[in-house]
Structures are given as structure tokens and as C-alpha cells.
């Protein structure tokens, strides 16, 4: 139960920190942090929480990471569902807290998307569903690949959270214009259920693509070195 609670708290921080930066600070008048700031915010949430709860739960914070680690032989199937449930609950709580904060400003409107992920007319850059699908699969695959490699026994001890956080930052720098960057179904769900409408209608893709990418990343790393364990 401590591991599940740690995953809930960690995912709460990821969604609140990452999506919060997008909703509250990205386009702040004259001082907005922009795409680069949001990308860095997501990376920092992962770095901070991987150090904080890594020894307790492994610091997955993401159903796609949990599934990817399972596919890579690093995580037992029996813990997958409880981890995913805890992560989604953490994301939903974060979305609720963010809504309470954001709605306190005059003129707040969920029509802006509330940091939700989308394709077509709801993609920040107007990218098609196929483009978003490919992007999310590939970005998640490489993210899981880095997680697998940086947490292997042969990797330098103590640096995994930095590598993982920097990788997630890079992923966001690449793909925010495409999909608003998910690579994490809990992150997508945590805000989509508050945004409603199109965000919920398109949520399926941001479960499917990251899970497929996570499995591919785990298998790919396992092929390269199937003798390593975390």
C-alpha cells in the first residue's frame, strides 16, 4: 500500500506541476514561460519525485512506464493494475486542485482545453490524428527505453532521475506542438475529465499510443540486454 500511495502522490505532483505550468504560467501576460518552460516543468516534476519516491515505488508516475517495465521484464504483472489505478487517481486529484486554482481567476474558461491532449483541430499545431498517434508512440517508446537503460544495474548509480527527467523535457520540447504531449495516460486523464467534451472524446488515443509505445520501448531494451535487472 505504501508503494501505491507513493505512486498516487508522485503522479499528483507530475500532473499538478506539469499541467499547472501550462494552464497558469505558459501564456502569462508578458512573462509567460512558453513551451520550453512547460517542458522543463514536466521534467522537474519527474526528477524531484523519482528522487523522493523512487526507493518506495520505483517512481513510475505513468501507466505507460509501468506497462513498459513489465514488457521489459522489470515489473510483475500482478502490480500493474494497482499501480495504474493509483496513478490515475493521483492525476484526477491534481486536475481537481488545478481546476480550483485556475477557476479563481476572472475569465477562466475550460474551452481553452485545460492542458488537455488532442489531435486535428485540438492539436496545438493542427496535426492529424495519424501524426499524433505516431508521435505519441515513438516518444513514449524512447522515454521507456531511457528509463530502462538509466535504471539498469550497469548505469551510474544515483543519476537515473536526472536522465529520466531530462528525457521527458526533450520529449515535451519535440511534441508539445503536435499533441500537447501526453506519453502518460494518467496525465491525459487527469485534465481531460475536467475539460470534458472533445478532450474526453479524444482521450482513447492518449491511452492507446503511450501503452503501445511503452511496450515497444520495454521490449526494445530487453532485446539489447535481456540479462540486466533493475
Image (tube, helix red, strand yellow):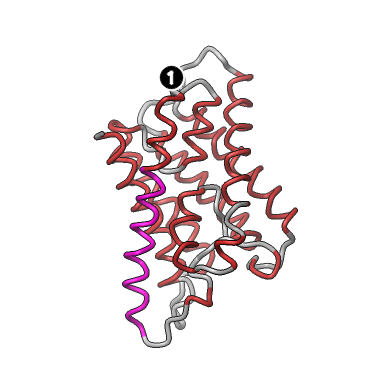
Residue 92 colored in magenta in the image: yes
Percent position of residue 141, x then y: 61, 38
* Residue in the picture at 53% in, 32% down: 68
In depth, the one of 37 and 15 nearer the eye is 15
* Residue in the picture at 49% in, 37% down: 65
Instruction: Residue lying at the far bottom in this picture: please name it.
Output: 106
Tell me the quarter of the image containing the N terminus.
Answer: top left
Q: Sort mark 1 into few (<14), some (14-19) or many (20+) by Cα contacts within 10 Å.
A: few
Residue 101 colored in magenta in the image: yes
Percent position of residue 179, x then y: 62, 59
Question: Taking 107 as reference, is 35 above or below it?
Answer: above
Q: Is residue 166 left or right of residue 133?
A: left
SS of the residue under disc 1: loop
Q: Is most of the magenta stretch helix, strand or loop?
A: helix
In depth, the one of 58 and 159 nearer the eye is 58
* Residue in the picture at 39% in, 37% down: 83
Percent position of residue 27, x then y: 49, 76
Residue bearing the label numbered 1: 153
Tell me the quarter of the image containing the C terminus.
Answer: top left
Question: Taking 152 as reference, is 43 above or below it?
Answer: below
Instruction: Residue lying at the far top in this picture: please name it.
Output: 227
Which portion, as a residue range, is magenta?
86-105
Q: Is residue 38 left or right of residue 132?
A: left
In depth, the one of 222 and 9 nearer the eye is 9
In depth, the one of 187 and 202 nearer the eye is 202
Amino acid at each position: 500500500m505504501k508503494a501505491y500511495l507513493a505512486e498516487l502522490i508522485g503522479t499528483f505532483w507530475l500532473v499538478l506541476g506539469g499541467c499547472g505550468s501550462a494552464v497558469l504560467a505558459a501564456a502569462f501576460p508578458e512573462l509567460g514561460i512558453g513551451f520550453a518552460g512547460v517542458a522543463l516543468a514536466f521534467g522537474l516534476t519527474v526528477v524531484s519525485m523519482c528522487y523522493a519516491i523512487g526507493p518506495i515505488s520505483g517512481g513510475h508516475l505513468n501507466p505507460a512506464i509501468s506497462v513498459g517495465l513489465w514488457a521489459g521484464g522489470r515489473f510483475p504483472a500482478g502490480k500493474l493494475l494497482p499501480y495504474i489505478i493509483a496513478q490515475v487517481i493521483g492525476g484526477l486529484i491534481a486536475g481537481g486542485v488545478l481546476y480550483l486554482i485556475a477557476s479563481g481567476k476572472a475569465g477562466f474558461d475550460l474551452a481553452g482545453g485545460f492542458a488537455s491532449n488532442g489531435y486535428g483541430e485540438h492539436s496545438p499545431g493542427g496535426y492529424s490524428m495519424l501524426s499524433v498517434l505516431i508521435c505519441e508512440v515513438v516518444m513514449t517508446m524512447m522515454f521507456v527505453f531511457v528509463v530502462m537503460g538509466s535504471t539498469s544495474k550497469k548505469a551510474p548509480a544515483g543519476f537515473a532521475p536526472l536522465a529520466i527527467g531530462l528525457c521527458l523535457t526533450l520529449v515535451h520540447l519535440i511534441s508539445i506542438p503536435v499533441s500537447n504531449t501526453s506519453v502518460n495516460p494518467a496525465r491525459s486523464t487527469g485534465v481531460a475529465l475536467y475539460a470534458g467534451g472533445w478532450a474526453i472524446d479524444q482521450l482513447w488515443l492518449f491511452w492507446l499510443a503511450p501503452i503501445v509505445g511503452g511496450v515497444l520501448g520495454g521490449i526494445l531494451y530487453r532485446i539489447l540486454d535481456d540479462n540486466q535487472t533493475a
